[in-house]
Image (cartoon, rainbow, N blue to C red):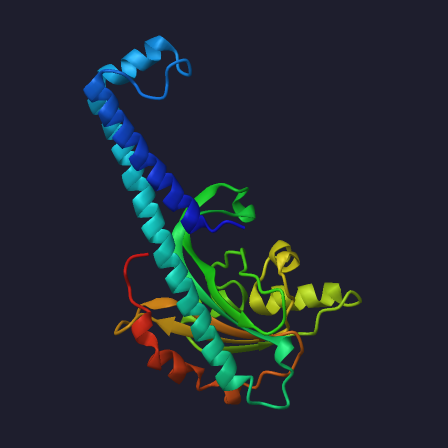
Amino acid sequence: MIKKTYILGAIQLLTLFLITVYVESVANNELLFTKGVLDEELRTKIIENPIKVLLALGILNFSIYIFSHQNRENKELFNLYNNICQLVFDKFIKPNTTLENSKFRVSLFKAKKGIIFRRSNYFLPEYRTYLKNVGRFQTRQEKKISKIKFLPNEGAVGKSYSIGEFMFFDTVKYSNNNESEYIKQQMNMLNMPKFKIKKLNDKSCSFISCPIKYFKSDDLFGVIVVDCLMPNKLKEEEFRTIEDVVLNYSVFFTNNGN
């Protein structure tokens, strides 16, 4: 698969080529490479309106540059957040020989503000805070970033974010035979809507969630979550020092308005 960065770079080069060709065309009063391709009246209008055309091409090129730059920044942050998740995994799960690595994963959620559509209000748009999965580490394949947006007080993520405290949750293990009980406990204990429970890639039953503050601030960046497919495998006292790990790396959680 062709990387998005390469595609954006190719489009930007094409735009610069078009600008160069157009400037040359205006100088010669002849729109190059378009004879017999474009309507003559359209070719004439393009030549006669250089300011508008160059402005449009310039805006297009600048927009691609901004989007490409933002895409590179997002990729760098994505790698950073994944590394932080792996750091937590390596410190708390990997060394423990009594734990089965493939049953665990570590996820990082960032609080964002934006437009969301909720079933509870008939899918009317709302501008509000939600938590988005921005980093993850696990040994089992296939690793997927969750597309579910958790609201404050929703799920292990949202509940920890809502009160800003370290939290521990343990529910019944999911299976086809006890799906209804699993959903019931998830709804009652974690305030998870039924439709979101059904959309989960992995239906975990043990959770440790730790809020993350912005560097030198009391405002919350988001929440880091350790979850397990097996019940009673996460012990709160063993994972309590996640708060210290997060604090040590808080310099990476800066409030830049994103």
Using the image as rendered, state which of residue 168 and residue 146 is in the foreground. 146
Q: Residue furthest top?
A: 41
Q: Work out whether residue 110 or residue 102 is closer to the camera in this orientation and state it.
A: 102
Q: Is residue 196 left or right of residue 129?
A: right
- Percent from the top left, x then y, of residue 122? 55, 42
Q: Quarter-wise, where is residue 95 in the image?
A: bottom right
For the residue pair 98 and 86, the one nearer the viewer reads as 86
Q: Position of residue 204 (x, y in %)?
A: 63, 70
Query: Measured from the top left, where is residue 221 in percent x and y?
Result: 36, 66
Name the residue located 35 percent from the left edge and 9 percent from the top edge.
40
Q: Is 73 placed left or right of 123 in the picture?
A: left
Above or below — where is 257 with respect to 51? below
Q: Pick the quarter of the image with the C terminus.
A: bottom left
Q: Residue at x 42, y 48 (%)?
A: 6
- Snapshot quadrant of residue 56: top left
Residue beneath the point at 52% across and 89% down: 238
Say which residue appears at 30% left-offset and 46% top-offset: 66
